Image (spheres, grey):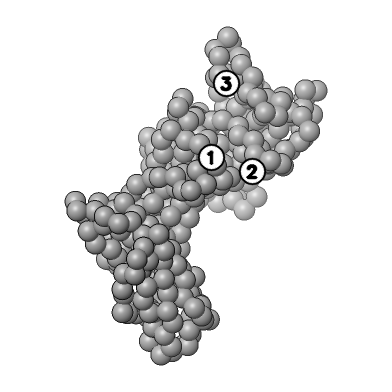
Amino acid sequence: MISLALFLSACSPGALSTMEGTPGKLAIAHPTALVASPTGPAIAHPTALAGTPEVGFPTAIAPPPGDMQPVFPADLPVVNDRLVESEDKVYANGEVENRSQGNIQFVKITARLFDPGGSQVAENFTFGYPAITAPGKRAAFSVVLDRPIAYQSYELLVEARTTSQPPFTGLELVDEFSESDDMGYAHIYGMVENTGETTLEHPSIIAVLYDAEGKVTNVSTTPPSTAEQMLAAGKHAPFNLLPYPFGTEFSSYRLILEGTPTTKSPPPELEILEIEKVGDRLVGFARFPGPGSVTVYGITVVFFDAKDKMFGYAVGITHPQDLAAGDSAPWEVVMIPLDYARYEVYASYSLK
């Protein structure tokens, strides 16, 4: 397995420590790594850590050129990393920059916490977004660990594999805005379009949130409002991303869009009927044409201003939520904006 260890100053719960006299920043210590020698003991090397291949990748038969090869550790630096604490969890957030000459996949990040005596007190791992990262781009991550009583340092181990597959490009952002709700929680709203030639399964929006210093403070994901988690070619779908943990503060963000092309056919569209504005509400009916039956999870109304810019987002539900073929049910959304120029209605549901 090839891995890159980055040892950073961390904190006792609630505060980040300072290294090298730079207030508020974490210093990176680059330890001497070990390279396993095939004919003798491990030898010291200043930049890389190499070992035996991971289980599942045989050594007797070389993988195809450009696919599933380990990425050299020096080409996988961790940048913009930061620890964030919330209740009983610690989040090790950051980005892995692809400094290799090709696309990479399976970017795995393992985070470990250590107590003042150097003993490991927590460990977990995750894979970065996007699934395939192009040269010069960054894969974002958030490793969730159980919060120990105390810890003083942490370690990040990174590994990845090469791929000849291109990064995903079939989902595009067509509109977005951010605002806080009545609880003070910031949301990121937007609209995506399937610009590919086939249906997308499991489309998702990943938000990478940054603090004022450019450190990653949160990585959260959400699906758009679709039927059966599928989005047909040429279709739009709105989304509402509420970062978790709730109340996460950020100064800026970027969005990563993912999805899986599929030959499956989307389910029949829910028909939206008889929409009427009543005071500060929109009311209407939804009908499922069939075949089969569905459970409706939400009716989303997106509002646009006079410049056709998305600026409002409201969600309601049908009563009842379960609809058989030919059934109709009323729905409503409340507290709609007063100065909208037009709106669009979308439904999120799954087949039963």
Quarter containing the N terminus? top right
- Is there any visible trace of residue 305 in the rendered image? yes
User: How far apart are the alpha carbons under marks 3 and 2?
Assistant: 19 Å
What label does residue 316 carry, if any?
none
Give the mark nearest the N terminus, 3 or 2: 3
On screen, 330 above or below 245?
Answer: below
Judge by depth and name the residue closer to the eye, 18 or 284: 284
- Mark 1 or 3: the one toward you: 1
Separation of disc 1 and disc 3 at Cα?
20 Å
Most extreme residue toward the top is 21
Residue placed under numbered mark 3 in the picture:
26
Secondary structure state at the residue bearing disc 2: strand
Q: Residue 99 location, x and y as percent?
A: 42, 32
The image quadrant of residue 158 is top right
Label 1 environment density (alpha carbons within 10 Å; few <14, some 14–19, many ≥20): some
Q: Which amino acid does label 1 sit on?
A: Thr
Cα distance between the residues tagged 1 and 2: 15 Å
Q: Residue at x 42, y 79 (%)?
A: 330
Query: Seen in the image, is 26 located left or right of residue 324?
Result: right
The residue at which mark 1 appears reads as 248
